[in-house]
């Protein structure tokens, strides 16, 4: 399972540590992923996801998973987020 946020698609980033002596060493910036269960009102079920803490804060700010998915553009969502967005739209239109 990759170190990737299910909703936003945020992944591991790579960079360098630079010491005072200007020696450069590679490092990884890993996203802070948490396993959470979010309630979807449109789908009438709970969904287990691995979400970054930044995305989790945004979900709470928007008022829930469904509101977050509908308010976020497709280019800002990851693969699982797009799949859930399609399901929510289909459930709300029915």
Image: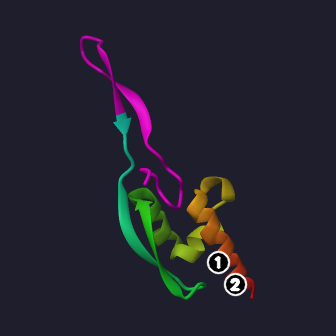
Q: Residues within 10 Å of mark 2 (few under 14, many from 20)?
A: few
Label 1: which secondary element: helix
Q: CA distance from mark 1 to mark 2?
A: 6 Å
Q: Residue at x 58, y 56 (%)?
A: 78
Where does residue 18 sit, x and y in percent of width and height?
Answer: 31, 20
Q: Give residue 8's position: percent from left, percent from top.
A: 53, 56
Q: Nearer the viewer, residue 64 or 26?
A: 26
Query: Which mark, residue 92?
Result: 2
x and y percentages locating residue 69 in the rendered image = 60, 69
62 is within the stretch colored magenta = no
> Is 75 above or below relative to 86?
above
Q: Secondary structure at mark 2?
A: helix
Q: Is residue 42 above or below residue 10?
A: below
Instruction: State the residue at coordinates (58%, 64%).
Output: 81
Quadrant where the image shows the N terminus: bottom left
Q: What is the crowding at mark 1: few (fewer than 14 residues within 10 Å), some, or many (at least 20)? A: many
Q: Is residue 5 magenta?
A: yes
In the picture provided, is 77 more to the left or to the right than 63?
right
Say which quarter of the image contains residue 70.
Answer: bottom right
Residue furthest front as drawn: 1
Residue 40 drawn above or below residue 68: below
Q: Is residue 65 left or right of residue 90?
A: left
Quarter of the image for the C terminus: give it. Answer: bottom right
Residue at the spot 51% in from the left edge and 85% down from the top edge? 45
Which residue is most to the right? Answer: 93
User: Label 1: which residue?
Assistant: 88
Q: Is residue 59 left or right of residue 84?
A: left
Start-end of magenta stretch: 1-27
- Say if mark 1 contacts mark 2, CB within 8 Å: yes
Q: Is residue 62 left or right of residue 48?
A: right
Q: Quadrant of residue 77?
A: bottom right
Q: Say above or below: 18 vs 1.
A: above
């Amino acid at each position: 399972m990759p170190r990737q946020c299910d909703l936003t698609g945020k992944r591991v980033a790579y960079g360098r540590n630079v010491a005072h002596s200007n020696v450069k060493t590679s490092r990884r910036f890993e996203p802070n992923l948490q396993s959470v269960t979010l309630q979807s009102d449109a789908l009438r079920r709970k969904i287990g996801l691995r979400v970054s803490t930044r995305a989790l804060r945004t979900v709470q700010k928007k008022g829930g998973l469904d509101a977050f998915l509908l308010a976020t553009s497709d280019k800002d969502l990851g693969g699982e987020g797009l799949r859930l967005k399609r399901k929510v739209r289909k459930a709300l239109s029915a």
